[in-house]
Amino acid sequence: MIGASIQKSPPKNVVLPHFIAGSISFIVLSVLTLLSSDILTVHFYNPRILAITHIITLGWITMFIMGSLYQLIPVIFESGLYSNRLAVFNFWFLVAGLTGFIISFWISGFMILMPVFSTSVFLSVILFCINIALSYKKAEKKNISGKFIITAVFWLFITVLIGLLLAFNYRFGWIDNSNFRFLKIHAALGLVGWFLQLVMGVAITLIPMFLVSHKLRFGLLRFAYYFLNSGLLLLYIYWQFDLHIMFIYTGAISVITAIVFFLVFIYDSYKKKLRRLDTGMKHSMLSFLYLILPVFLSLIIVFSKNPGSVITNKAILLYGLSAFFAFFKYI
């Protein structure tokens, strides 16, 4: 299977630019973080903090994910990438959009620059989603890993669509003047629906493969998949329609239950491994343990009786950072 997958892999000019752009984004992120050290402890709804957040999510993590996923499609879907040309267009739309998007946040250019460059990011994501969806359609096997990945791509589309609406709302003000309700949906779908679900989908294929683990409890993953997406749907319904508080409690518990099922599967893979852990795998295994911190912080945020308190705001910042750096440890 590995040999056939290598033959189906996309050319270097499709994959490598994503890693180069992701690395440059990380350097820019480091510089801007140093320049903004005085505002990192204030409320998260700050233009410069939002700029840094989007460099992390779009320029660093999503750029790396796209490049990695293009490379891993032949392994996970057992089919070639649908279109290398779409991948190249997807990359350049994202680079152009992201560059202008971050500048828009940094200089508070919300009225003109933000809608234009957020549209470029949205077009990039549409091309990416089409490419992955059509690659999945021609996949030889429709396994649970592919199900996680294609659903993660769906949540990415919804996340960026909401982001586009928020960007236009700065100019036209026709959604919600505070933006906070949609910002919560945007953040939750991005972190849990896109990042976490994508990591799950890739990990449940690669971890057993690299550890040479057999006779695993794949039934756990079906529970993880349905609990995760049911929880996300409940969270979305609560924030969208402002329904009973039990929706957010049930949604949060459902997502955490999904993470537990996933971690049990990873532990089962570790217990049944036939290979010793190399350095890279040690980092990956530790990253799964790091998921415990954002889970704990999410409980503080969800069950907080004073959502606007200093403690809750700091928990939100730490939650985002801990989730991002767990991903960094994984890659």
Image (tube, rainbow, N blue to C red):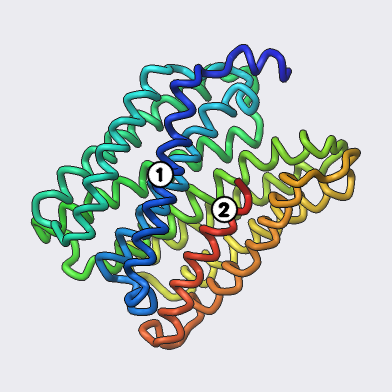
Residue nearest the observer in this picture, 4 or 325? 325
Residue drawn at x 52%, y 64% is: 251
Residue 207: % across, % down:
74, 41
Secondary structure under the numbered disc 1 in the rendered image:
helix
Q: Mark 2 points at which residue?
A: 327
Residue 54 is marked as none
Residue 313 location, quadrant: bottom left
In the picture provided, is 13 more to the left or to the right than 52? right
Residue 93 place in picture, x, y as percent: 28, 33
Q: Quadrant of residue 7?
A: top right
Drawn side of residue 216 relative to residue 32, left or right: right
Tell me the crowding category of disc 2: few under 14, some 14 to 19, or many 20 or more residues within 10 angstroms, Cα based: some
Relative to 251, 165 lies left or right = left
Residue at label 1?
Answer: 24
Above or below for 321 versus 217:
below
Q: Which residue appears at 36% of the width and 64% of the height?
A: 184
Q: Can residue 241 be seen in this view?
A: no
Q: Residue at x 39, y 27 (%)?
A: 130
**Which residue is rendered at x = 27% and y = 34% of the image?**
123
Q: What kind of residue is marked 2?
A: Phe
